[in-house]
Amino acid sequence: MHTLPYQNYIFDLYGTLVDIHTDEDQPAAWAALARFYSYYGARYAPDELRAAYLAEVGRQTAGREGLRRDSHEAHPEIELAGVFQALFQAKGAPADKTLAVHAGQFFRAMTTGYLRLYDGVPEMLAMLRAKGGRLYLLSNAQAIFTAHEMRALGLADAFDAVYLSSDCGCKKPDRRFFRLLLDEQRLDPARSIMVGNDPVCDAAGARDAGLDVLYVHSNLSPADPLPEATFVLPEMDIPRMGAILAGEVQPS
């Protein structure tokens, strides 16, 4: 069996394995969420609810703002269920964490235009696993959304361990987020590679943590110059990504 060039493969999620489009500015989504809140005694006009949501996010993220403001990452610097819970409490409506999570998931579903894997992702992950690779996820993301989206996409059992920023209290490109994974899983950085689509959060952050990097420029990548990386894919091509990660080809 061909020997893999790395033992540990650390993947970003959105824009690397998963293609997603979200739009939190849809009036219909805020109207639906306001109706959901009214079911539990928290009555908002849609515009009032949107303003309250943004204000609460701003309050909780003060001094901790993330590098990117992509809505699909949904404020990775905080645990967003607390925002949805606070919106109930502001209207005097009792709400436990479970109800707050359901409110957040309802909103996420209403604001997601599409959610899909890039072509070839299951086959690539299965190939790396079959060849003895260990697979990890390190994502700036909200657990209340991402865990369920991974289940819907068939990724729930794809990784040896999953690290989401909302659970961990830090986010890429912070070295602490990378170190948390490396230390807890006892990974040797010299035998590990980060795969991601963000020049700063993934590529620069991983290099700072001592990791090799495969950078892929996808439809969700920031409009930054191509970064310094061990491997660079200038466009999304999962079969070629898998071949590079398996050591079967070099990038052209």
Image: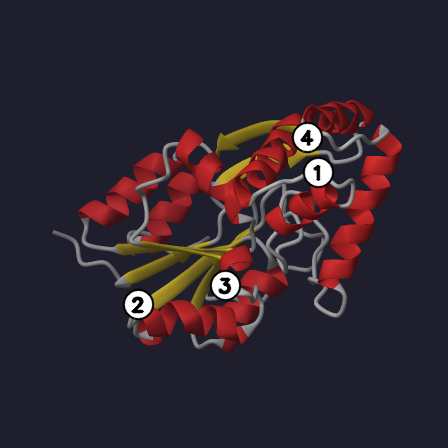
Seen from the viewer's position, the closer of residues 139 and 63 is 63
Q: How far apart are marks 1 and 4 (CA)?
A: 24 Å
Q: How far apart are marks 3 and 2 (CA)?
A: 14 Å
Please state which amino acid type lies under the numbered disc 2.
Gln
Please state which amino acid type lies under the numbered disc 4.
Thr
Disc 3: which residue: 168
Disc 4: which residue: 111
How many neighbours does mark 3 have within 10 angstroms: few (below 14), some (14-19), or many (20 or more)? some
Disc 1: which residue: 93
Q: What element carries label 2?
A: loop
Mark closest to the chain's N terminus, 1 or 4: 1
The image shows residue 38 at horizontal and vertical percentages of 74, 26
Disc 2: which residue: 185
Seen from the viewer's position, the closer of residues 221 and 184 is 184
Seen from the viewer's position, the closer of residues 176 and 88 is 88
Mark closest to the chain's N terminus, 3 or 2: 3
Q: Distance between the residues labelled 2 and 4?
A: 35 Å
